[in-house]
Each structure stands twice: as structure tokens, then as C-alpha cells.
Image (tube, grey):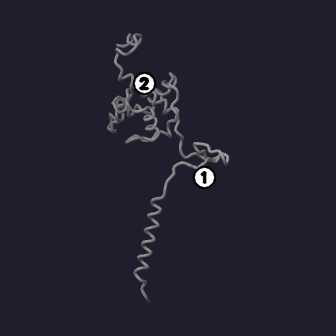
Amino acid sequence: MTRPAPFVFLLLGVSLLTACDNMAKQPRDKTWTPADGGSANAGPDRKVWPPQPPPNSIAREDLPQPPPALTAALLARGKERYEIYCTPCHGYLGDGDGMIVRRGFPQPPSFHGDALRNAPTRHFYEVATNGWGAMYSYADRVGSDDRWAIAAYIRALQASQNTAAAELPETVRGTLR
């Protein structure tokens, strides 16, 4: 019986490594787009942006939602949702001293630090949507509108804890202790 020449093994090894390398470097597109770059809902000479998936398909990702208008009802809803979902870690004042932190869980950052006071409101929405650090995503528990309401309430918490009494209207100052 004859042994195959060493170059056959070398050729086989190189072809396997090349195939694996090409598969590892495949481009990845997370959103659906038609092959022609247009939209399934557009005519041949008209393109719609952003591209829309075909009818009766299931979306893989939510499209970014614009922030709603700031209203008293939005803040009330945000307070309610914040107290349900956020206070166990972040505390009622947003200082990162919630009940489970007192029992040994890692402390989240305070909403009253410079970094988070200067962050855009969308940051709070995105963190609730995607998670950050030890915080997991709440997208499957809290709807998009409620995440915006929570973000608005966090802004109200920040204002309540970082505004000097002299800057408040006279009617509000009279109610302070």
C-alpha cells in the first residue's frame, strides 16, 4: 500500500483553514433590507426609507421611538413605573440605595452625578431597553411608552434633588419645610 504524498495533506489543510476563515469574516446585517436596497413596498422607480419588511412578517427589532411630549400624565405614569421596576436598585430618590443594594447587590450609579445629569434623556430609555453593566434589559417587561415615562420621571427626580431653593417659585418655596 502506498502512502499519499505530503502535499495532499498540506493542500487539504490549507483548503479547510481558508474555508473557516471566510466563514468567520462574513458580513452581518441585523436589519432586513431587500436585495436591491429599496423597499418591498416601493414601486420600481420609488424607494421608501427606512426599508419596510414584507407584509405579514415579524419584526426582529423595535424601531427607535421618538420621545413623547412631557405632560403631567406622563410624569405620573413614569413615577408609578419607576416605583415598581426601578426602586429596588435605584431607590426612591434615584441615589442608588435601593432595598436589594442594602442586602448586598452591587450599587448602581446615582442619577444625581454629573455624568448622568448631563446624559441625554434617550440614554435612560436605551439603558432600560438594552441593559447596562449589571442591569439587564427591561424591554420584555416594560413597554416603550413606559420606558420613556420612566426616563422623564428620572429627569424630574434629578431636578428635584439638584435645584436650589432660591431658584424655586415663591408658591413652591412656601410649602417647603
Q: Amino acid at mark 2?
A: Ala
Neighbor class of circle 2 (other Cα within 10 Å; few <14, some 14-19, many 20+) is some
In the displayed structure, 23 sits above or below 168; it is: below
In the displayed structure, 21 sits above or below 104; it is: below
Q: Which residue is mark 2?
A: 156
Q: Which residue is mark 1?
A: 36
Q: x and y percent of residue 86 in the render?
A: 42, 33
Which quarter of the rendered picture does the N terminus lie within?
A: bottom left
Neighbor class of circle 1 (other Cα within 10 Å; few <14, some 14-19, many 20+) is few
Q: x and y percent of residue 164 in the render?
A: 34, 18
Residue drawn at 52 percent across, 38 percent down: 64
Q: Amino acid at mark 1?
A: Asp
Which quarter of the rendered picture does the C terminus lie within?
A: top left
Q: x and y percent of residue 53 in the render?
A: 61, 46
Displayed quadrant of residue 7:
bottom left
- Who comes first in sequence, dot 2 or dot 1? 1
